[in-house]
Image (cartoon, rainbow, N blue to C red):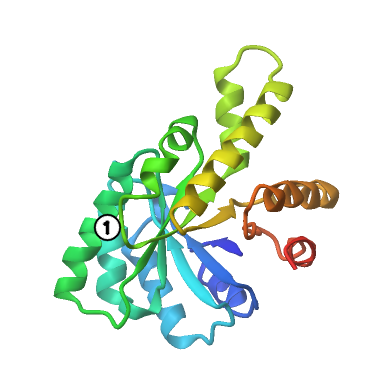
Amino acid sequence: MTVPAAPASALRTVARFNVDEVILDLRSLQPRDKTDFTRLAIVDALSKGTWQAGTVAVQINPRGTRWFEEDLIQLVMLVRSGIACLVVPAEETEDIIAASQLLNEMEAQFPVETPIGLEARIETPRGVRHAEQIATVSPRLEALIFDSVTYARAVDSAVAGSASEVTGEQREQARSRVSAAARAHGLTAIEGPESPDRAPDVVIRNAERSRAAGFSGTWASAAWQLPLLRGVYR
């Protein structure tokens, strides 16, 4: 289950969800909300709440933005062992290498009980092209997340005219490529967030395609999607 990392009420709500993983999303916030106060709210929620999820992860902002290092440094300093994984948008190996190296430096200064893992979120043609290399660059890496919805938009924008058939074919090829890269290197393949305004039958159909391609689950972005996805990945 993925939710924006603000407002604080959203964190209290998602803490009650009995899911495999909760992803608190800093990336999707408006620039005015990408602040120390939001990161402190995550710290407060993790320290005070009883979380039902098996894993709590935080999606940070991409490398190259001014929030990338701020997110990672402050979360390690303040939360330490409360976060199991960081989700990093990845188009090339340097995105994961930079996060891994910064985590090495921070954990040397602020020791944690268990090293923080990384999940690479792949959502562009460039990222898919480098999926095999991305999967190999850090021992912290635990999963590849393929955001097929964003990927399809990227393909649409690159193709003139009506691209629905081209997009569908390319999306399935990309999904298979990411899945193969993950499995070849002992990583988990996860489908990225399903749009909250999708019809239930579309949510089920997309999840079935992902499962057939070797994916182990799909990010839900709305509570009503959870029973549908559990039915596919049971």
Residue located 59% across and 82% down the image = 52
Q: Secondary structure at mark 1?
A: helix
Q: Is residue 38 above or below residue 218?
A: below
Figure quadrant of the C terminus: bottom right
Residue located 72% across and 63% down the image = 233
Figure quadrant of the N terminus: bottom right
Where, by quadrant of the figure, is residue 141 drawn?
A: bottom left
Comparing 7 with 216, the one in front is 216
Amino acid at pointer 1: Ser
Q: Is residue 62 at all visible to an observer of this figure?
A: yes
Q: Which residue is mark 1?
A: 100
Residue located 53% across and 43% down the image = 178
Comparing 157 with 212, the one in front is 212
110 left or right, relative to 164: left
Q: Position of residue 143 (x, y in %)?
A: 47, 58
101 left or right, relative to 178: left
Residue located 62% across and 12% down the image = 160
Q: Residue furthest top?
A: 160
Q: Position of residue 186 (x, y in %)?
A: 46, 59
12 left or right, relative to 99: right
Where, by quadrant of the figure, is residue 41 drawn?
A: bottom left
Q: Position of residue 78 (x, y in %)?
A: 29, 75
Where, by quadrant of the figure, is residue 101 drawn?
A: bottom left
| Numbered marks: total | 1
Q: Is residue 28 at all visible to an observer of this figure?
A: no
Q: Residue furthest front?
A: 184
Q: Is residue 196 above or below residue 15?
A: above
Q: Position of residue 76 (x, y in %)?
A: 28, 70
